[in-house]
Image (cartoon, grey):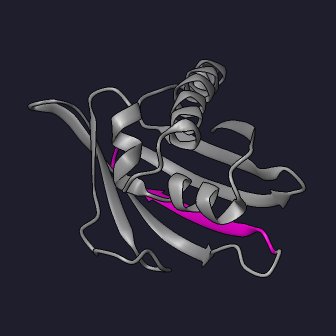
Amino acid sequence: MAVFRIERFSPLPVAEAWRRVTDWERHAAHVPLTSVSVPTGRPTRVGTVFVARTGLGPLAFDDPMEVVRWAPPAGGRAGVCRLEKRGTVVLGRASIDVLPTDSGSHVVWVEELRVRMVPRWGDPLLAAAGRRLFGGALDALLAGSGAP
């Protein structure tokens, strides 16, 4: 299983950083050839399912994810979101923690990925690609205008 961790510090207040990194549809704007839908609808809560569809036409796959823990930041406490990846191609889990700091927020994103048909020796390459791809998406989400 490929495991990687991304951390970013932002001047955004913790509630705004949380809102941006858990706005699932906005992730698609920063991940090539990907669209995101939320078939269970809003608001996000435990049991929410969203699906990232990546690829072109018939050469695409769905990456369904379910929110298994949802605790938005409140009262000086960090926000915590845990996801289970339940696809036929991508399996694993992710955690997103958004912690308050004196100057804004600290986001910690950890992924544990297994991609079917990628042998274990490919895990370091998969982790490096994930750090780059998701790190770029996280940077863009935190830097964006914040408009819904």
Q: In which quadrant will I find the C terminus? A: bottom left
Instruction: Determine the residue positioned at 58% across, 42% down.
Output: 142
Name the spot of residue 15 as percent of width and height, x first.
Answer: 64, 66
Name the spot of residue 26 as percent of width and height, x first.
Answer: 38, 47
The total of numbered circles placed on residues is 0
| Residue 87 seen in the figure | no
Q: Nearer the viewer, residue 111 or 18?
A: 18
Q: Is residue 79 magenta?
A: yes
Q: Is residue 42 left or right of residue 60?
A: right
Q: Nearer the viewer, residue 133 or 98?
A: 98
Q: Is residue 134 left or right of residue 64?
A: right
Residue 38 sits above or below residue 135 on the image: below
Q: Nearer the viewer, residue 108 or 103?
A: 103
Residue 102 falls in image quadrant: bottom right
Magenta residues? Answer: 77-89
Name the spot of residue 37 as percent of width and height, x first.
Answer: 26, 57
Q: Residue furthest right?
A: 102
Residue 127 falls in image quadrant: top right
Instruction: Determine the residue positioned at 79% across, 60% down.
Output: 99
Residue 104 sits above or below residue 57 on the image: below
Q: Residue furthest left?
A: 57
Q: Is residue 30 magenta?
A: no
Q: Nearer the viewer, residue 32 or 61?
A: 32
| Residue 14 seen in the figure | yes
| Dominant secondary-structure state across the stretch colored magenta | strand
Q: Is residue 11 left or right of residue 145?
A: right
Name the spot of residue 140 as percent of width and height, x first.
Answer: 52, 34
Instruction: Determine the residue positioned at 44% across, 57% down.
Output: 23
Q: In which quadrant will I find the N terminus? A: top right
